[in-house]
Image: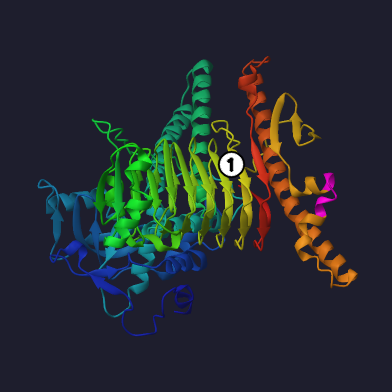
């Protein structure tokens, strides 16, 4: 009894009565109730696997540790269960358990209760199938019949843990993984967290679909790999056929390893969004109206005469456009955007608008608030992946406050085309703005805060211009995703006069792989802001405060002129000057450091690119092919009170 209690993860057997709930199996009153164990919380499963089942075992020891756990907690006989498959359900009695094989020895219950989804599968078929299986069936296919005494609680929970583990955690290739790491830490915990993050709608549906697709591909390839390996080991064919099979096996192995790496990135909660999925956007642009007309949409919850007069004076005056305007009125901003065609304008009047849906903007339109951003609030209501999705060639959004609650993805996603955001406020709960591959974002004089991920995510091959913005109180300020992969292009980034402060991690983070590349290091030569690596030319706009200070010592006085007061003693004035100069130098150094690191990474990519071309036999490369220029302008940005500093690299 003491050994059993030590393994008990929920309560004690000394306490009378069950602690588990009961449920009708699939609503079928033909069968007795079963224990309800499929609604366990994350921490309950986590504790069971970490403390009682797997502990610090290696992948190759999982079956051994699992069998030991079952021997301690499973009742060997005397309990009933429903044997459930995709074809039938049968009430059985357990007479013994084979823990090492994860099987139970059963017999049909009396009277025999059976329900089949196939008319030809009868009670007699059940008996024949049991005889064929020698009355041994997998524990995962058993659902323990409810017993209020509490005697079989641990049995029901143990079977649930085994069932969940082999359905949601275990992968067929795990056993062949190297045993240098703790299996629970490396595989179980991240997969368990991902499972519950999906259940609780914290993972974008597109990423979930990608994960399931990758998992299916990997399982299919691994089955092919095992079949090929088995055929090779049992084959007596000539060496030429064996060599062909070996090459095919190596190709399969490489594909499997590539898919496994992608799966691990999604399973890891820290790397999940670093990996980033290429979301398919089904948004279709409407284009121009058949007659070529453009409409101005006015949104207001209530239209007062004074407001209408102001609108006509400021926005709707025909003289301003040189032609008569066609105007449509709406009370809902989402309805107004959905009614737009190419070239339309949406003017949103002051008010608080709660929307239950996604702004899908596929045409080049202007969306502007009439007034100050804090007076024109559009708030996301209800759960959903996205808030604002942009794919139009030239979209302009201005003078709005976007508030996002309980969402999965960021407040604004630029998938394609160019989106300009000016004088806006973005209050986020997940990621802020995402600039995807081949998309362009221009963000000016805006304020972004509250993201549990990064305030701005910059994908490879994108163009991102950030001017005079505030990005603060996020997990990270700006995250630049890995662009070293051969399939990725280098992003173009401009950051000028932004205030990036009070973020939990870094102000700016560059994601890089830890995989060592076989590329020779090359020295960088710095000449007045131009770095030369071999044949590649990567130009930076490095006219930072630090450079200006060194070049023009007299400009230092202008920076602290506001702090000079004639009535202050000279010693105090000197201290103020030194403090101010130190702040200026520190900020300039941060700007320089970011640009320098991005340049070095870009150079590494160029070297990798050259090496691949060389391997292909291309020695005299075309300049357009060889030089992937990365333009980075990092100027006059201020980084303050970020938890880990102004800039860091995230290695994965």
The magenta-colored residue range is 550-556
How is the structure coloured here? Answer: rainbow
Local crowd size for mark 1, using a 10 Å CA cut-off: few (<14), some (14–19), many (≥20): many
Residue 71 is inside the magenta segment: no
Residue under the point 32% across and 73% down: 152
Residue under the point 32% across and 61% down: 354
In this rendered view, identify the residue nearer to me: 177 or 630: 630
* Residue 16, quarter of the rendered image: bottom left
Q: In the image, residue 258 lies at what x, y percent?
A: 52, 37
Can the viewer see residue 519 in this picture? Answer: yes
* Residue 392, quarter of the rendered image: top left
In this rendered view, identify the residue nearer to me: 557 or 566: 566
Residue 552 is inside the magenta segment: yes
User: Label 1: which residue?
Assistant: 482
Left or right: 233 as drawn, with respect to 598: left
Q: Is residue 249 above or below residue 8?
A: above
Indicate the secondary structure of the residue bearing disc 1. loop
């Amino acid at each position: 009894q003491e050994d059993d209690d030590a393994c008990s993860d929920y309560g004690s057997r000394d306490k009378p009565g069950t602690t588990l709930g009961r449920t009708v199996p699939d609503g079928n009153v033909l069968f007795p109730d079963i224990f309800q164990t499929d609604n366990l919380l994350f921490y309950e499963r986590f504790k069971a696997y970490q403390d009682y089942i797997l502990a610090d075992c290696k992948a190759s020891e999982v079956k051994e540790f699992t069998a030991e756990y079952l021997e301690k907690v499973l009742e060997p006989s005397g309990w009933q269960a429903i044997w459930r498959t995709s074809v039938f359900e049968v009430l059985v009695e357990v007479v013994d358990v084979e823990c090492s094989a994860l099987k139970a020895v059963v017999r049909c219950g009396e009277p025999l209760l059976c329900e089949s989804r196939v008319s030809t599968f009868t009670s007699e078929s059940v008996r024949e199938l049991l005889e064929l299986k020698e009355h041994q069936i997998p524990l995962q296919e058993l659902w323990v019949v409810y017993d209020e005494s509490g005697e079989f609680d641990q049995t029901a929970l143990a079977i649930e843990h085994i069932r969940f583990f082999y359905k949601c955690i275990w992968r067929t290739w795990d056993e062949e993984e190297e045993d240098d790491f703790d299996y629970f830490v490396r595989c179980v915990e991240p997969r368990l967290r991902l499972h519950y993050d999906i259940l609780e709608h914290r993972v974008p549906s597109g990423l979930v679909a990608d994960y399931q697709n990758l998992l299916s591909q990997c399982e299919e390839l691994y089955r092919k790999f095992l079949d090929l390996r088995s055929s090779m080991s049992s084959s007596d064919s000539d060496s030429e056929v064996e060599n062909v099979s070996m090459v095919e096996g190596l190709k399969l192995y490489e594909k499997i390893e590539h898919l496994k790496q992608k799966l691990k990135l999604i399973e890891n909660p820290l790397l999940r969004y670093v990996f980033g999925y290429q979301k398919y956007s089904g948004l279709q642009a409407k284009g121009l109206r058949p007659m070529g007309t453009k409409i101005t949409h006015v949104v207001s919850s209530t239209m007062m005469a004074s407001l209408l007069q102001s609108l006509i004076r400021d926005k709707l005056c025909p003289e301003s456009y040189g032609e008569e305007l066609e105007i449509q009125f709406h009370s809902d901003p989402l309805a107004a955007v959905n009614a737009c065609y190419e070239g339309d304008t949406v003017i949103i009047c002051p008010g608080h608008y709660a929307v239950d849906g996604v702004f899908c903007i596929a045409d080049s339109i202007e969306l502007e608030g009439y007034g100050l951003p804090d007076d024109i609030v559009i708030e996301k209501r209800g759960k959903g992946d996205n808030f604002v999705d942009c794919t139009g060639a030239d979209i302009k959004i201005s003078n709005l406050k976007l508030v996002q609650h309980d969402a999965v993805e960021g407040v604004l996603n630029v998938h394609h085309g160019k989106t300009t955001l000016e004088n806006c406020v973005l209050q986020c709960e997940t990621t802020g703005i995402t600039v995807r591959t081949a998309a362009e974002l221009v963000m000016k004089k805006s304020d972004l805060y509250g993201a549990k991920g990064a305030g701005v995510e910059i994908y490879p091959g994108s163009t991102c211009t950030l001017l005079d913005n505030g990005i603060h109180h996020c997990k990270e300020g700006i995250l630049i995703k890995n662009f070293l992969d051969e399939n990725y292009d280098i992003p173009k980034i401009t950051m000028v006069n932004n205030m990036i402060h009070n973020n939990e991690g870094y102000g700016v983070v560059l994601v890089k792989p830890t995989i060592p590349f076989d590329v020779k290091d090359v020295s960088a030569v710095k000449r007045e802001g131009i770095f030369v690596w071999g044949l590649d030319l990567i130009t930076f706009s490095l006219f930072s405060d630090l450079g200006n200070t060194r070049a023009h010592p007299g400009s230092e006085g202008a920076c602290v002129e506001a702090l000079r007061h004639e009535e202050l003693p000279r010693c105090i004035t000197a201290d103020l000057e030194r403090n101010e100069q130190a702040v200026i130098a520190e900020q300039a150094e941060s700007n320089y450091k970011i640009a320098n690191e991005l340049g070095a990474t870009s150079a590494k990519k160029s070297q990798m690119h050259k090496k691949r071309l060389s391997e292909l036999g291309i020695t005299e490369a075309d300049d357009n092919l060889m030089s992937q220029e990365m333009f980075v302008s990092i100027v006059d940005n201020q980084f303050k009170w970020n938890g880990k500093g102004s800039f860091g690299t995230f290695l994965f």
